[in-house]
Amino acid sequence: MTVEKLLRWIELLPPQERHQPVLVVDGRSLTPEDMVREARAGTDLGRKAQALWEGGALGTEEEMLIERIKKRLARYPPDKPLFAVLGAPNLLTPRDILKNVEERTELGKKWIETERRYLKYLDKLKERV
Amino acid sequence: MPVERVMVSTRPNFDTATWYASYWVGITLRFLEEMGMRITDLSGDLANKEELVKAIEENDPIAYWGVGHGSETQFAGQDAYVMLEKGVDERLFVGRIVHLTACLTGAEDGLLESIANAGAVATIGYKVELIVGVMTDNFAERPDNAATESLMKPDCAIEMSLAEGKTVVEALDVADSVAEDEIEYWRASGHPDADLVIWALINNRDGLVLYGIPQVSVLEEYPPLHPFNVIVGVASLIALGLQLIRWEKMEPEKVVIKYE
């Protein structure tokens, strides 16, 4: 993989995703921008990240998925409704979602699974570069 | 026998989520009417169990499309009053195609699976929390905001496809494809909440489920039985029966294996 290929992938991502962790290397969460920085510096971390990125290893660790959900929700006021849903309650706040995710309720597990699928979608964008 | 091209719809509108969903379903119903569907549209206060039962008994529709709050075992109408309950209301939908735009009714062993098991030809719904609105400051708190339009499009596409004559499984493929288009739109949009909308679209897309027979459509034809066809059918069955009796009585041919 070249850094250029990685950069082309990053350009395809929604802007918010450039600062979101996408994989874990040696216990450290890396964002796409971290990956570019490490790759350019030619570090061991960068080489490992490249190998994982090419192998399609995004989003396999549950802790990282939860970290991603938390980071995304942190952009919004915790008690202001974020989603309107056709269930009960009909408005979900970031705090509601986070509570379910952290407690791994049935609902929380579904949100985590959605995050896994979302990351898979981002991973698939690699095929376009 | 349920009548093809006839639909009953219920769409409460008493809170943000039902208001948003009801708006888009209402627009879609007008398109469906232009496409030749005959629709009984029970909206607002009419979205209750009594009116639903009455409309189904009077119209015998092939299709029911309900919007409302849902759980694994219940589906609600106006003011969150329960309209359908697992173990209680299944018989209402025998021979029909049921589509619930609601949270969780498509969960395994839930309401929609139970309705299909009781004799509905197909049931469509969601096994996840169905997101119909993204409530950030970047979207107006009105049902025609861009996020809600995107989130409702795949679900409405199901009914549009069915009205075009597609089978249920084909209609679900169309919904999937519409969701993909919306995801692609938001990915390239540069919108500050694009990730949130994509996330919601993926949640809804992957939560869509189908129970029952995938190859049915709302244009299913049930040809009437003509007396001549009945006579020919009965005569054929008698002839076949007589032939089977004759075969039964025949001695089986002996097979002789010769060893050189």
Image: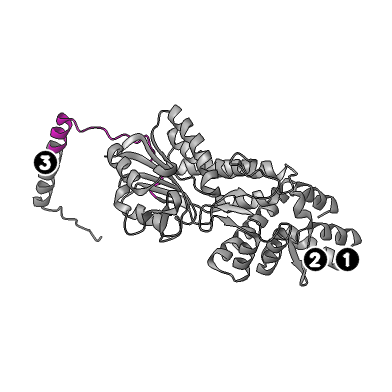
Give the mark nearest the N terminus, 1 or 2.
Answer: 1
> Where's residue B199, x and y in %?
64, 53
Residue B55 lies left or right of residue B243; in this view the side is right
Q: Main secondary structure of the magenta part?
A: loop
Residue A46 lies left or right of residue B162; in this view the side is right
Chain letter belonging to callout 1:
A
Q: Is residue B232 magenta?
A: yes
- Would you name the residue on which mark 3 appears? B238
> Where's residue A69, x and y in %?
68, 61
How crowded pointer 3 is (Cα within 10 Å; few <14, some 14-19, many 20+) is rated as few
How crowded pointer 2 is (Cα within 10 Å; few <14, some 14-19, many 20+) is rated as some
Residue A16 lies left or right of residue A118; in this view the side is right
> Where's residue A36, x and y in %?
84, 57
- Identify which amino acid the numbered label 3 is placed on: Ile
- Would you name the residue on which mark 2 appears? A48
Image quadrant where residue A39 sits: bottom right
- Identify which amino acid the numbered label 2 is placed on: Lys
- Would you name the residue on which mark 1 appears? A43
Chain letter belonging to callout 3:
B
User: Is there one chain holding both mark 1 and mark 2?
Assistant: yes
Q: Specify the farthest residue to the right.
A: A41
Q: Secondary structure at mark 1?
A: loop
Magenta range is B212-234
Discs 3/2, front: 2
- In this view, B177 is above or below A16: above
**Which residue is more in the foreground, B204 or B38?**
B38
Q: Is residue B190 magenta?
A: no
**Which residue is more in the foreground, B205 or B130?**
B130
Q: Secondary structure at mark 3?
A: helix
- Identify which amino acid the numbered label 1 is placed on: Thr
Chain letter belonging to callout 2:
A
Image quadrant where residue A54 sits: bottom right
